[in-house]
Image: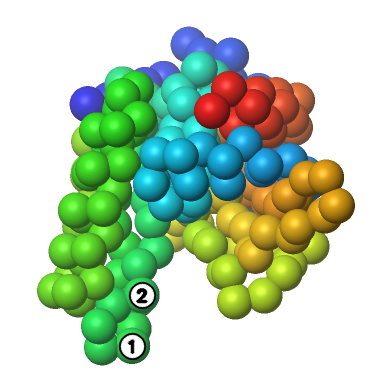
Amino acid sequence: MKTEINPQDTSRAQAFEFWMTSPMPMVTLTKTFNVSKILKASRKSNIRFNALLCWCIGKAASQIKEFYLLPEQGKLYRYDRIAINVIVNNSKGGINSCDIAFNENLEQFATDYNRLTAQAANECRSSFLEEYMIVGTSAMIQTELDSIVNQYTDKFCNPMVMWGKYRKKLFSTILPISFQFHHVQMDGGHGATFLEQLQQEINKL
């Protein structure tokens, strides 16, 4: 459910005053992750790498209360559920957007991921979950990337997690991941905590 709230009644009151009208309120952090556990889990479970990473993103985000807040058109909203947005290459050579509700059950999330992304690809049609807090993702696996900075726009203020192709090292597999968020929603410390929590969730796979 999406509910408008008074910023002054939240811990983000000062941030709302500082950053709501800023022309460039987005912050980008980049961290290099050890994703060896994702590769191992993918081979063992037959769940795709990106599906596993998206589940870990949802799991980490769901534990941080700031992720449930969203500044939008001069207002602040609170959600009670999180979904992961995936960009899908469709059958006509274009792209579509696909929202997948986060589920604590990994197998169910993977099933939903496969069904919804296949539907978007085949039907060339986007799907949206308006009552969910959306955490955007974008995987550009055509090449290795060190960092990604997304567009700065007031049309999409949701947090965004982005990555390229993972890199195999001698004893591990690494992946730089960029995380962009609106400064009203959270501070740099919250963003850093999310990235640390994401690595911990990856390690648990």
Q: Secondary structure at mark 1?
A: loop
The CA span between labels 1 and 2 is 7 Å
Determine whether 164 is above or below 64 in the image.
below
Residue 204 placement, left or right of 1: right
Q: Quadrant of residue 132?
A: top left
x and y percentages locating residue 182 in the rendered image? 59, 42
Q: 12 or 8, which is in the foreground? A: 12
Q: Quadrant of the N terminus?
A: top left
Determine whether 199 is above or below 112 in the image.
above
Q: Label 1: which residue?
A: 93
x and y percentages locating residue 60 in the rendered image? 54, 26
Q: Label 2: which residue?
A: 89
Tell me if residue 17 can be seen.
Answer: no
Q: Quadrant of the C terminus?
A: top right
Label 1 Cα neighbours within 10 Å, binned few <14 / some 14-19 / many ≥20: few
Residue 150 placement, left or right of 106: right
Q: Residue furthest right?
A: 170
Three-letter amino acid code at the position of disc 1: Gly
Tell me if residue 146 can be seen.
Answer: yes
Q: Secondary structure at mark 2?
A: strand
Three-letter amino acid code at the position of disc 2: Asn
